[in-house]
Image (cartoon, rainbow, N blue to C red):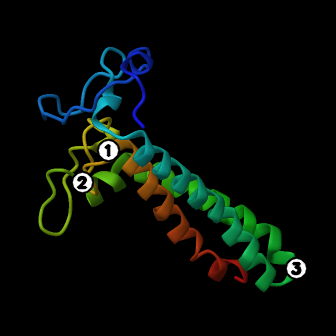
Amino acid sequence: MAAPASLLEGLPYVPLSPYDGSVPTGGDSGVDNVNIFYESGDISFMIVSTALVLLMIPGVGFFYSGLTRRKSALSLIWLSVMATAVVSFQWFFWGYSLAFSHKAGKYIGALDNFGFMNVLAQPSVGSPRIPDLLFAVYQGMFAAITYASLDPYLGEA
C-alpha cells in the first residue's frame, strides 16, 4: 500500500542526478551537495568494507606474531601498523594516481591526481556508483594490507 502524498512531502529527500562532468572534482563540497550523484547504500557499504579491511591489518600482525618466536611477536604487530602508515603516505601522494588515474596510459597512470588533486566526488574509475575519494581510501587499505602480509618475513631477521 502506498503512503499518502502528504506524508512524503515533509521528508528531506534529494533526488539523484547524473554526474555531468562539468567540474573535474564533482563540485565544491563547501557549496554544493556532492552526494546527489550517489546512493547512500553504496557509500555506506564501501565505508563498512573499508573499515573491515582496516581491522584486518593488525589482525595480520597478530596472526603472524603467533607463528614466530615469542621475542618477535610485538615487533610484527608494530611492523604491520607501521606498514599501514608508510603505505598510506605513498598511496595518498602518488600511488593512487599511478594506479587509478582517469587519464591513465596503457600500463601506468598519470600523476594528474598527485597528492589527491581533483579527487573528491567525481565518479571513480572502479565504479560510477561511488565517489573517487571513497574508492581511493578503499583501495589504499588493500595496498596497506598487501604490504603488511609481507612483513612476517622481516620478523625473524
Helix or strand or loop: what does disc 3 sit on? helix
Residue 37 sits in which quadrant? Answer: top left
Residue 96 is situated, as x and y percent measured from the top left of the image, at 34, 53
Q: Residue 125, which numbered label? A: 2
Q: If you read the primary sequence from the N terminus, does the residue marked by circle 2 or circle 1 appear first? A: 2
Helix or strand or loop: what does disc 1 sit on? helix
What residue do we see at 22% from left, 49% from top?
A: 111
- Quadrant position of the C terminus in the picture: bottom right
Residue 144 is situated, as x and y percent measured from the top left of the image, at 52, 62
Image position of 125 (left or right of 7): left
138 versus 156 height, above or below: above
Q: Which residue is mark 3?
A: 70
Image position of 53 (left or right of 77): left
- Quadrant position of the N terminus in the picture: top left
What residue do we see at 77% from left, 76% from top?
A: 65
Q: Which residue is mark 1?
A: 132
Q: Amino acid at mark 2?
A: Val
Mark 2 and mark 1 residues within 8 Å of each other at the beta carbon: yes
Residue 39 is situated, as x and y percent measured from the top left of the image, at 36, 41
Q: How many marks?
A: 3
* Within-10-Å neighbours for mark 3: few <14, some 14–19, many 20+: few
12 versus 97 height, above or below: above
Q: Residue furthest front?
A: 1
